[in-house]
């Protein structure tokens, strides 16, 4: 009996040893997370928007193209959106390009038409700009009557540079400033795809207007919100100035950028 007990004990010890001696083999895999910032601006617009002034009433009241451009924004980061007037610079970086000249070289006929004479109106106000952001923080105001010259819709121009609007100029959404710092303005990341459609902060419908006036001096042209007039009399310092008849071209560039 004694030998059997010793054998049984040995078997029990061996069994315990087998259970406790667990084999483990480990391998690791590295997981990398790369969060690239995504800013996506979708634009629906005609290839070309034409303003043909061939009637005296059009000079006085202007021509408006309603809903000509639709902008839809998606972004993973805080963002700003602005518009800037540009040309190829044949007449200078702040002027329309003159393609055809109908004039007769009259000293009062001015061929340098400021880009800022183009007016924009956006479908809803800029919710990402504080009241301190410029005289006019966006283009949401109704177009001013021809009898009341105003800078409220005049297009921002940066003389062909990459300079974003300052605190004294208009943005469509957001404004100059850094996200997360008190007193500065921005739009939070998001997308028009999961917002409230055309009334959201990620969807803007743009109207365009040009008002030459009588005489054709473009009284609404200004170089900044509430800033210096760029009508042709002011620009040329000639009381008899008027726009030289002809065909002119320029383009509007919409820029979506991460808030800085």
Image: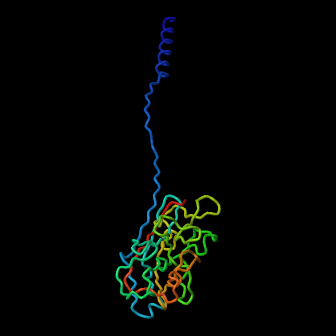
Q: Where residue 2 sits: x, y (%)?
A: 52, 5
Q: Which coloring applies here?
A: rainbow
**Where 242 sits versus 17, above or below?**
below
Question: For this view, does 129 lie left or right of residue 16?
Answer: right
How many numbered circles are shown? 0
Q: Where residue 208 sits: x, y (%)?
A: 46, 80
The residue lying toward the viewer, choosing from 116 and 1, is 116
Residue at 47%, 67% (x, y): give it.
Answer: 192
The residue lying toward the viewer, choosing from 233 and 87, is 233
**Where 185 sits versus 87, above or below?**
above
**Where 42 sits versus 206, above or below?**
above
Q: Where residue 37 sits: x, y (%)?
A: 47, 55
Residue 103 found in image quarter: bottom left
Q: Where residue 226 sits: x, y (%)?
A: 59, 77
Residue at 51%, 86% (x, y): give it.
Answer: 238
Q: Quadrant of the C terminus?
A: bottom right
Residue at 47%, 64% (x, y): give it.
Answer: 162
Question: For this view, does 43 lie left or right of residue 121?
Answer: left
Residue at 48%, 80% (x, y): give it.
Answer: 117
The residue lying toward the viewer, choosing from 41 and 27, is 41
Outermost residue, bottom side: 56
């Amino acid at each position: 009996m004694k030998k059997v007990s010793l054998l049984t004990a040995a078997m029990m010890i061996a069994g315990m040893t087998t259970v406790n001696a667990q084999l483990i083999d480990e391998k690791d895999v590295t997981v990398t997370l790369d969060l690239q910032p995504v800013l996506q601006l979708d634009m629906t617009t005609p290839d070309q928007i034409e303003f043909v002034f061939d009637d005296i009433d059009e000079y006085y009241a202007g021509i408006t193209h309603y809903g000509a451009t639709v902008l839809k924004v998606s972004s993973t980061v805080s963002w700003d959106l602005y518009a800037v007037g540009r040309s190829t610079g044949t007449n200078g970086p702040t002027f329309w390009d003159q393609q055809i000249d109908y004039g007769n070289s009259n000293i009062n006929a001015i061929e340098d038409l400021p880009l800022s004479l183009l007016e924009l109106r956006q479908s809803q106000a800029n919710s990402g700009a504080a009241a301190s952001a410029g005289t006019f923080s966006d283009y949401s105001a109704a177009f001013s009557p021809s009898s009341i010259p105003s800078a409220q819709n005049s297009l921002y121009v940066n003389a062909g540079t990459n300079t974003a609007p300052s605190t004294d100029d208009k943005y469509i959404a957001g404004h100059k400033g850094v996200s997360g710092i008190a007193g500065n303005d921005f739009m939070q990341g998001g997308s028009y795809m999961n917002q409230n459609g055309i009334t959201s902060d990620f969807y803007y419908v743009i109207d365009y207007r040009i008002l030459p006036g009588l005489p054709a001096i473009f009284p609404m042209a200004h170089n900044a919100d509430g800033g210096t007039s760029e009508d042709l009399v002011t620009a040329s310092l000639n009381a008899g100035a008027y726009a030289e008849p002809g065909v002119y071209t320029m383009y509007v560039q919409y820029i979506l950028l991460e808030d800085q």
